[in-house]
Amino acid sequence: MNSTSRPRRHADAVFKLVDGEALIVVPGSSAEHLVLNDTGARIWELLDGEHDLDSIRSTITDEFEVGEQEAGSDLAELLADLSEHGALADTRN
């Protein structure tokens, strides 16, 4: 993915906030469920196909008071994990 990519959540993914943590279940995925912290939950909310990676990184930088580099590496790591577990929609043409 590049900075102008607009990743989306998998359409069948179920998301619920429980006690400050986000639980995600993707039917048919290799993971029973995924658990995200508050930063990961906010990123998940922004994975709507409307926000590009630059704007998501900027939002995380502003809302969580972290540097651009840290926000970018956290975002890349989470996207890789979500992709590995089938939680992102296939956006290839």
Image: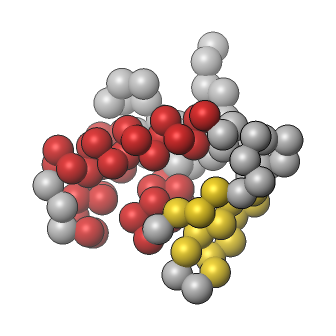
Q: Residue furthest right?
A: 28
For the C terminus, the image quarter is: top right
Residue 88: x and y, percent? 63, 39
Say if residue 54 shows up in the picture: yes
Q: Could you tell me which residue is drawn at 21 percent across and 50 percent down?
A: 70
Label total for image: 0
Name the foreground residue: 30 vs 10: 30
Residue 59, by quadrant, is: bottom left
In the depicted structure, whether residue 41 falls above or below residue 71: below
Q: Could you tell me which residue is drawn at 71 percent across and 57 percent down?
A: 33
Q: Residue furthest top?
A: 93
Name the foreground residue: 5 vs 17: 17
Residue 85: x and y, percent? 66, 40
Query: Which of the colour schemes (rainbow, by chain, secondary structure, one colour) is used?
Result: secondary structure
In the depicted structure, whether residue 79 falls above or below residue 21: above
Q: Could you tell me which residue is drawn at 48 percent across and 40 percent down?
A: 79
Residue 4, by quadrant, is: top left
Q: Could you tell me which residue is drawn at 18 percent across and 68 percent down?
A: 65
Residue 13: x and y, percent? 74, 52
Name the foreground residue: 35 vs 39: 35
In the rendered view, does 43 fall on the left or right side of 32? Answer: left
Residue 22, by quadrant, is: bottom right
Say if residue 11 shows up in the picture: no
In the rendered view, does 91 fall on the left or right side of 14? Answer: left
For the N terminus, the image quarter is: top left
Residue 31: x and y, percent? 72, 47
